[in-house]
Amino acid sequence: MKFAHLIEINDPLNPLIEPLSREQLWRGLVLRAEQPKMFVPWLDECSILSHSTASMERRLRYGDTVIEDRVTFLPRLHVHYHVPQQNDIPASDLNVTIEEPQPGLLFVRFEYDDNNNDEGTADAFYNEFRRSAYQESDIDTVRMIRQMAAAGTLDAPAA
């Protein structure tokens, strides 16, 4: 299943939405990778196995399920999550890209790919549920980033 959606970050026509800077948005996206429990309440544990400015490897535990992934960073532009195939978990990718078609007009594009192109009838219902869950999770991520920015949490430099 491949799925992509775009979230508008700054809306110059809506004065009720406090604009975020590209730096604040980037710092929030990095925090999502480094401290995922802040963004995923059902995550039981995250261990950082290795970390550099360009990438990190993590071990995530959801109950009895353990997933290892690799996160790579293209600073202030792109975060890529790659889950290699492991046990019963198929390989998958998530690309998170900051887009700025005009100065200050920010969007975040989320692109999911589970490397499975089989869109059978049985999968269609499940995939629609997953699309909805991914989109809600991404909206929650942006909401958390906005809250952190308003609290001044994103004013310190990030990796």
Image (cartoon, grey):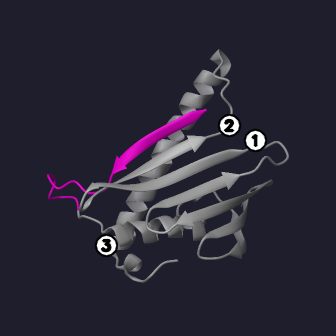
**Residue drawn at (16%, 53%) of the image:** 14
Residue type at tag 1:
Pro
In this image, 118 relative to 137: left or right? right
User: Marks 3 and 1, Cα distance to the nearest angstrom?
Assistant: 38 Å
Report if residue 83 is visible in the image. yes
Residue type at tag 3:
Ala
Report if residue 35 is visible in the image. no
Q: Mark 3 near mark 1, Cβ–Cβ under 8 Å? A: no
Q: Element type at marker 2?
A: loop
Residue 25 in picture, x, y percent from top left: 39, 66
Residue 91 in picture, x, y percent from top left: 73, 44
In this image, 102 relative to 108: left or right? left
Q: How dense is the environment of label 1, judged by Cα within 10 Å: few (below 14), some, or many (20 and up)?
A: few
State the extent of the magenta-drawn residues as a range: 1-17
The residue identified by callout 3 is 150
Q: Element type at marker 1?
A: loop
Q: Mark 2 near mark 1, Cβ–Cβ under 8 Å? A: yes
Q: Quadrant of residue 90?
A: top right
The residue identified by callout 2 is 115
**Residue drawn at (75%, 50%) of the image:** 84
Per the image, is 95 magenta?
no
Q: Mark 2 near mark 3, Cβ–Cβ under 8 Å? A: no
